[in-house]
Every structure is written in C-alpha cells, then in structure tokens.
Amino acid sequence: MAAILANHGRMFQAGATMIPGTDAGVSPGKPHDVLPYALRALVEQIGMTPLQALRAATTIAASAIGLGGTKGRIAAGADADVLVVRGDPVADIGSMTNVQAVFRAGLRAR
C-alpha cells in the first residue's frame, strides 16, 4: 500500500487528474460512508490541500463523468446537491466525517 500511495503522490505532483474512489458498498469492510476517509488520504498521503481534495471529489469528478454542468458545484441551474458538515473542511478535511445534513435536488435527505 505504501508503494501505491507513493506512486499516486508522484502522479499528482506530475499533474495527473485525480478523483477519489472507495469501492464503497462492495463488502461489509467497505460501507457506503467511507468517502470522507478517501479525502483525508488525498490530503495526508497524496499531498493535496484540503481544497484540492474537495474539488477532486466534486467539480473534477462531475466533469470527468460528463455531469459538470449540473453536478459538483453550487450555481444557478445546478442540481442543488449539498453536504453540510460541522467545521471547515478547507481548514480540516477531517470535518467531512461530521455530516450534519444532506440535500439532494434542494430537498433535505438526511
């Protein structure tokens, strides 16, 4: 794992586009709520800033799958999918594990 993470860090430093993924939900050891930990790994092990990790998981990911016009951003005409966390994830990416609310299409889902 250390070699894989080191390689990912070199790829990021070389300018590769990076998008977090977790295979969440494929087994009991990978529940659906593990993406915040992948963001932490991007910061702590790959060398991204918290803002870069957040962009990788939102704007860049949406663009990579052809949904950049409606997903991954907060703007007029976008889908209004919003995650509310306690704390400032730009200052502390770990705050992404402290979810307070989820909005999907502008409606509170959680």
Image (cartoon, rainbow, N blue to C red):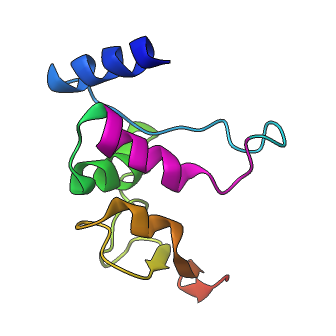
The image position of residue 98, as x and y in percent, is 52, 74
For residue 104, side relative to residue 3 (left or right): right
57 inside magenta stretch: no
Viewer can see residue 80? no
41 inside magenta stretch: yes
Rendered view: 52 above or below 22: below
Q: Quadrant of residue 45?
A: top left
In the rendered image, the residue lying farthest to the right is 28
Viewer can see residue 89? yes
**Span of residues in magenta:** 30-45
For residue 80, side relative to residue 6 (left or right): right
Q: Quadrant of residue 90?
A: bottom left
The image position of residue 102, as x and y in percent, is 57, 79
Q: Which residue is pictured at 23% across the width and 36% down the height?
A: 47
Q: Which residue is pictured at 26% across the width and 55% down the height?
A: 50
Rendered view: 71 above or below 66: below
Q: Quadrant of the C terminus?
A: bottom right
